[in-house]
Each structure stands twice: as structure tokens, then as C-alpha cells.
Amino acid sequence: MPKASDLKPEDRFFGLFVSTSGDGKSCAGATFPKKLKIFDHDLRIRGLLGGKSFIDKFDEIEYESYPPSRPLTEFFDTLNMLEIQYIQGKRPYETLQFDSLTSQSRFFLSDAMDLTQGRVIGGKSVIVGGQNKIIGGIRVSGPADHNIKDQAIYRMFDFLRSFPCNIIVTA
């Protein structure tokens, strides 16, 4: 039977930075070991400029922005490619940062609604979906949408747990 006294600390950091908007979560994450990639879901990557005086190796920070119009599948395709690289023994990044879980969750829900209800433009359904629900020109989510969103978040964290590098998620 294993004993707690036999445990060794991990050689990576896995953390959630939580604070109000603008408090410097992204800048704090950017001080972690480089090469670093930021997945920018809140579209506030320029906040890093406020920490340029204390963030080292600024040129070793890459980012990829995910506006709401970008499909969920592209995000998971990128995570899948990273997983393959890590399995092959490559270490493309020392730190991966995800800004922010709050925005990602909202975008996952929006994508789920596109899948279950179809797309709505100008308050009218463009693609006929199974359970369109529009109130006052705004789509309203249902239980199936939230189930898809939850599964997307679980899947994301399954990927993150498998990566042998520092993981930072902001919220």
C-alpha cells in the first residue's frame, strides 16, 4: 500500500488564478517559465503590456485569440495537436495559460446553442435547429446546451491534466 510519505512534489504548477477583472492575473501567469502560450478567450491580451516592465522573455510568449465567432472544434483541435506533441516527447511550451475560464464557459455555451438550436441573426433563426427558443430576439439556452458546455469544460480539463507543463487558468 502506498504511503503519503512516499509522494514527491510534481515538477509543474497547475493553478487557477481568480480575481476581479483587471487585477493582473494574465500578467502574473506570464511570469512563469517560457516558452509560454496564452489561449485568449476573453480577448484582453493587450493587458500583458501593463506588465512588460517585469515580465521576462516577452518575445517567448505566444498567444492565440478565440473570439466567439471561432468554433469550439478549433480550440479542441489545437489541444489535440499539443497532446500529440507532448506524447511524442516534444515540449513545445513550458507553460500554457487559459484566459479566462469565465469567457470560455460562455463561448462553449454559445457554441452548444448553435449546435442544438441553430444560428440566430437579427432575432431570426438562420439554420433550423431542434429546439429554437427566442425571447425578445435573444436565444435562450436549455438543459441540453448546458450539458454540452459542461462536457466541453470537462474535456478541456482532461487535456490540461495530461500536459506535462505548467498550467494556468484564470477566472
Image: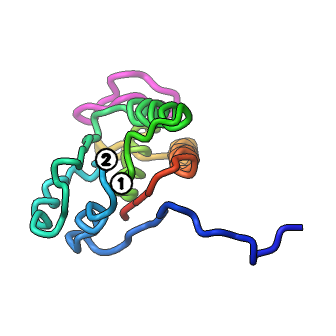
Q: Position of residue 79 (x, y in %)?
A: 45, 37
In the figure, 51 relative to 101: above or below? below
Q: Position of residue 134 (x, y in %)?
A: 38, 41
Q: Quadrant of the C terminus?
A: bottom left
Q: Residue at x 53, y 31 (%)?
A: 88
Disc 2 crowd rating (10 Å Cα; few below 14, some 14-19, many 20+) is some
Q: Position of residue 53 (x, y in %)?
A: 9, 68
Q: Secondary structure at mark 2?
A: strand
- Report the front residue among 153 and 85: 85
Residue marked by disc 2: 37
Is residue 12 one of those drawn in magenta? Answer: no
Residue marked by disc 1: 97
Q: Position of residue 5 (x, y in %)?
A: 75, 77
CA distance for labels 2 and 1: 6 Å
Q: Residue at x 52, y 61 (%)?
A: 11
Is residue 123 one of those drawn in magenta? Answer: yes
Task: Answer yes or no: is residue 140 visible.
Answer: yes
Disc 1 crowd rating (10 Å Cα; few below 14, some 14-19, many 20+) is many
- Report the front residue among 104 and 169: 169
Q: Residue furthest right?
A: 1
Q: Which residues are magenta?
A: 115-132
Q: Residue at x 34, y 28 (%)?
A: 125
Q: Amino acid at mark 2?
A: Lys
Which quadrant of the figure has residue 166? bottom left
Q: How many marks?
A: 2
Answer left or right for 21 relative to 125.
left
Q: Quadrant of the N terminus?
A: bottom right
Are the residues flagged by discs 2 and 1 in contact, CB closer than 8 Å?
yes
